[in-house]
Image: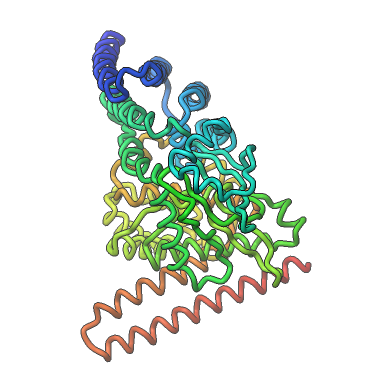
């Protein structure tokens, strides 16, 4: 594309942005802050588009070292611009930045490494604003039941912050209070993001991030409703009550509202803090196995999935029986999977674990990614195609250069990956995020390539696939045969797990 053509397109984009800016300003009834936030986002978007377009002119092929070097610099400049934008605009911009920063195996490392800091550097609301929100939502009478309320938050996130409090009856609470302006700003921010990604898609059709704007518009209003979050917490607690190691904090509805959520105060270390686990005699591999089992049950058995398991939302502690307990926090972001998606996703995972290329291709087609089934399976598993095709996921065999290979491919195949993200069913987008958060935890615990993780997943997938076959069987004889096959399949998985544990223990001893 020539410079004149680019200028014309950018001019059209600026006109579109200006129109959107007028609409955004009307939404907030003339609030100058809303206009400034929009203008800041528009200028950042234009700067990134120009940088990519100018830097990519006359570049050699993608396999050339010069290409890799230049693109790495452009990725880094763009990521730094996004970080500054998210930090200055706050609110849902930080939320989206955190989302991008969690996609370790889907985006170039420059974006992931730069935006990861947003998980720990969210802005803090003053104590005056915190008490004002609580007074407006709960009233003076309810507030009078608090004995103490710590002014310094124990945790701060993009949409809210959490304070420790004690009621007059001695009950210890964690009180989550929404940042006062975040809901009002969210309407402007969502419209801004939608306009920006549409403009980028118009200029660069191969770099369409419409999925990101769509997901933000769909999920952010739900995350801003803390009563909805409380109901999610109670639902998942009841749904998974049979899992002994899971703890979901109790909700105290009397002290909750759409902007305030009071829950049982739970202590523990972050799920990625290996040092904490070793110091408190918590088995690290057991933590990883428990997380794998927990999410396999949510995804494959129930189809109701907590989609924000970054380390600050998952605590670990040692039980009196010296076992690892998982404390699951922040229940604002869930996805509900259709039965069709759940069954097909289970079959896809079974094909990936077995290295069954024909099965991978078949089930990738069912998710609109048949022509890119190899790339899609790598994005799902977070493993290189060489490991998937050679069935290394079942054995735990590791290529020491695999992570580097994955991130290099992410930089080279960014257009194809964006294509996949725009094509897959919408449920898959949050599953991608969830998978990458869990892989990030495993990576920091040094348990990422465990075969046991895939064993847990294989058990859940096998149960789900056979349950569906049994349900669809037309005769009791057919159902009986399928139940026998399921039993044999589960016994084979158990035998594989015991074999892996034996050789792992033997290797440790030697």
**Is 261 above or below relative to 57?**
below
For the residue pair 89 and 497, the one nearer the viewer reads as 89
Is residue 238 visible from the viewing direction of this image? yes
Can residue 70 be seen here?
A: no
Q: Is residue 353 left or right of residue 206?
A: right
- Residue depicted at x 32% and y 24%: 28
Query: Residue shown at 56%/41% (left/top)?
Result: 404
Dividing the picture into quadrants, the one containing residue 289 is bottom right
Q: Nearer the viewer, residue 450 or 185?
A: 185
Query: In the image, is 129 to the left or to the right of 347?
Result: right
Against 286, residue 496 (above or below) is: below
At x 55% / y 31%, what residue is drawn?
128
Q: Give the farthest residue toward the bottom.
A: 477
Q: Quadrant of residue 203?
A: top left
Between 229 and 64, the one nearer to me in the picture: 229
Instruction: Determine whether, in the image, residue 233 is placed left or right of residue 192.
Output: right
**Residue 72 percent location from the top left of the image:** 51, 26
Q: Where residue 246 appears, x then y in whole percent?
A: 55, 65
**Image coords of residue 214 (percent x, y):** 30, 39
Write down the quadrant of residue 344 in the picture: bottom left
Q: How is the image coloured?
A: rainbow
Q: Classify the position of the C terminus by image quarter.
A: bottom right
- Locate the N terminus by quadrant: top left
């Amino acid at each position: 594309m020539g410079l004149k053509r680019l200028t014309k397109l950018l001019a059209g984009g600026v006109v579109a942005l200006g129109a959107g800016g007028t609409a955004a300003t009307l939404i907030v009834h003339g609030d100058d802050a809303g206009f400034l936030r929009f203008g800041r986002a528009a200028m950042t978007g234009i700067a990134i588009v120009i940088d990519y377009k100018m830097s990519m002119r006359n570049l050699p092929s993608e396999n050339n070292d010069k290409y890799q070097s230049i693109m790495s610099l452009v990725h880094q400049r763009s990521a730094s611009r996004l970080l500054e934008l998210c930090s200055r605009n706050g609110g849902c911009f930080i939320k989206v930045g955190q989302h991008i920063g969690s996609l370790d195996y889907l985006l170039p490392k420059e974006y992931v490494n730069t935006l990861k800091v947003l998980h720990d550097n969210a802005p803090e609301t003053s104590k005056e604003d915190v008490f004002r929100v609580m007074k407006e939502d709960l009233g003076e009478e309810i507030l009078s039941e608090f004995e103490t309320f710590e002014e310094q938050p124990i945790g701060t996130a993009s949409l809210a912050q959490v304070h420790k409090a004690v009621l007059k009856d001695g009950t210890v609470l964690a009180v989550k209070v929404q940042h006062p302006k975040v809901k009002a700003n969210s309407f402007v921010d969502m419209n801004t993001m939608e306009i920006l990604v549409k403009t980028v898609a118009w200029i660069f059709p191969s770099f369409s991030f419409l999925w990101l704007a769509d997901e933000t518009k769909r999920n952010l209003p739900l995350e801003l409703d803390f009563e909805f979050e409380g109901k999610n917490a109670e639902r998942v607690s009841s749904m998974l009550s049979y899992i002994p190691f899971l703890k979901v904090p109790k909700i105290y509805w009397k002290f909750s509202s759409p902007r305030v959520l009071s829950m049982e105060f739970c202590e523990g270390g972050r799920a990625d803090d290996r040092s904490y686990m070793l110091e408190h005699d918590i088995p690290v591999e057991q933590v990883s196995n428990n997380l794998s089992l927990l999410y396999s049950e949510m995804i494959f058995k129930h189809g109701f999935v907590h989609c924000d398991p970054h380390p600050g939302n998952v605590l670990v502690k040692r039980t009196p029986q010296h076992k690892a307990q998982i404390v699951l926090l922040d229940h604002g972001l869930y996805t509900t999977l259709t039965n069709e998606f759940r069954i097909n996703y289970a079959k896809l995972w079974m094909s990936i674990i077995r290295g069954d290329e024909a099965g991978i291709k078949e089930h990738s087609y069912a998710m609109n990614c048949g022509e890119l089934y190899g790339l899609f399976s790598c994005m799902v598993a977070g493993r290189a195609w060489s490991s998937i095709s050679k069935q290394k996921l079942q054995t735990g065999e590791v290529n020491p250069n695999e992570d580097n290979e994955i991130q290099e491919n992410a930089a080279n195949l960014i257009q194809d990956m964006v294509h996949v993200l725009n094509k897959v069913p919408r449920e898959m987008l949050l599953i991608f995020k969830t998978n990458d958060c869990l892989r990030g935890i495993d990576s920091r615990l040094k348990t990422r390539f465990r075969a046991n993780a895939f064993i847990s997943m294989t058990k859940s997938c096998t149960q789900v696939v056979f349950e569906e076959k049994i349900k669809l069987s037309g005769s009791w004889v057919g159902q009986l045969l399928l139940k026998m096959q399921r039993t044999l399949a589960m016994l084979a998985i158990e035998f594989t797990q015991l074999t892996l544990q034996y050789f792992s223990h033997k290797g440790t001893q030697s």
